[in-house]
Amino acid sequence: MTEFDFDFLRVLLQRRSGLFLSTEKRYLVESRLGMLCRRRGIAGITALVVQLRSSPASELEAAVIEAMTTNETLFFRDRTPFDLFRSVVLPEKLAANAESRTLRIWCAAVSTGQEAYSLAMLLDEAADRLAGWTIEILGTDISVEVLDRARQGLYSQFEVQRGLPIQLLLKHFRQEGDKWRLSERIRDMVTLRQHNLLEPNHQLGQFDVIFCRNVLIYFDVPTKARVMAALAERLARNGAFILGAAETVIGITTTLVPDPQHRGLYRDAASSPQARRPPFPAAPELGGALSPRKIARP
């Protein structure tokens, strides 16, 4: 791969997906796009760039973006955000939304679905408290390929062993050969759709809770600011915004402010006094099945 090839791909990927590639990530381009070239019978990355230049906005360009934006995920990754959701955010929303009895959650950059399905399993554990509620979990990703995998709900032994408690594996999955299939009931709790975080999102409506974890680390500062501004517009008043442990909004946006009591939790600045209130008591571990209706999309 020549310097010209690398520079062309860097510009293309940042413009189309927001992905920022430093020179230290050259190996990643060579590895992932080298595999793409071999699968498609393309002579090499230089030949790939020639095709991309001759056919902009093509199916091949989409495949390049897919290959470079697919990132690792796992069930209950960095357990703390899920504990925070269960013990602080969920009780808070049950109180705040008691009249409407609705709860909307957005998992941005959901990849193969583990984050959204982890939340669905947590909500299933609180089914008794959510009886009569309308629940929607929306998972979006730029990659059509990973969303197809998420819809299937089929995971390898390695994937289910990483972060998934054994009791939830036995309760919500069935073994199919050397893989595990998530139950249709849990899969039906999640709506999956393709969405680029750089594109308009007003059609998605407002959300009580937004998870956007381990995404901003791939963007440069201007792109982070652009993405955060768009996401903040989708957060309902008194909403909860959860980032990854290594991420922050400080220096990127003033629309969201950190909750001083809970690392990784952010509030919309307009309702920032909410962040100073004492936390709600932990949600009890309750059994029972949850069969939610989906909120009609705006």
Image (spheres, grey):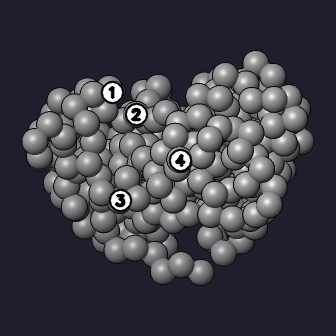
The image quadrant of residue 189 is bottom left
Q: Which mark is residue 163?
A: 1
Return the x and y of residue 136 as percentages of the image width and height: 44, 65
* Of 235 and 34, the residue lying toward us: 34
In the image, which is nearer the foreground, mark 4 or mark 2? 4
Disc 2 designates what residue? 74
Disc 4 designates what residue? 41
Q: Helix or strand or loop: what does disc 1 sit on?
A: loop
Badge count:
4
Callout 3 amino acid: Arg
Question: Rounded to the nearest whole Å, what is the CA distance between mark 2 and mark 3?
Answer: 15 Å
Give the residue displayed 52% in from the left and 40% down from the top. Answer: 38
Does label 4 or label 3 sit earlier along the sequence? 4
Q: Is residue 214 above or below residue 246?
A: below
Q: Quadrant of the C terminus?
A: bottom right
Question: Rounded to the nearest whole Å, what is the CA distance between mark 1 and mark 4?
Answer: 37 Å
Question: Rounded to the nearest whole Å, what is the CA distance between mark 4 and mark 2?
Answer: 32 Å
Question: Rounded to the nearest whole Å, what is the CA distance between mark 1 and mark 3?
Answer: 20 Å
Does label 4 or label 2 sit earlier along the sequence? 4
In the image, which is nearer the foreground, mark 4 or mark 3? 4
On the picture, is 181 further left or further right than 46? Answer: left
Callout 1 amino acid: Gly
Disc 3 designates what residue? 151
Q: Helix or strand or loop: what does disc 3 sit on?
A: helix
State yes or no: discs 4 and 3 in contact (Cβ < 8 Å).
no
State yes or no: discs 2 and 1 in contact (Cβ < 8 Å).
yes
Q: Quadrant of the N terminus?
A: top right
Callout 2 amino acid: Leu
Question: Rounded to the nearest whole Å, what is the CA distance between mark 4 and mark 3?
Answer: 29 Å
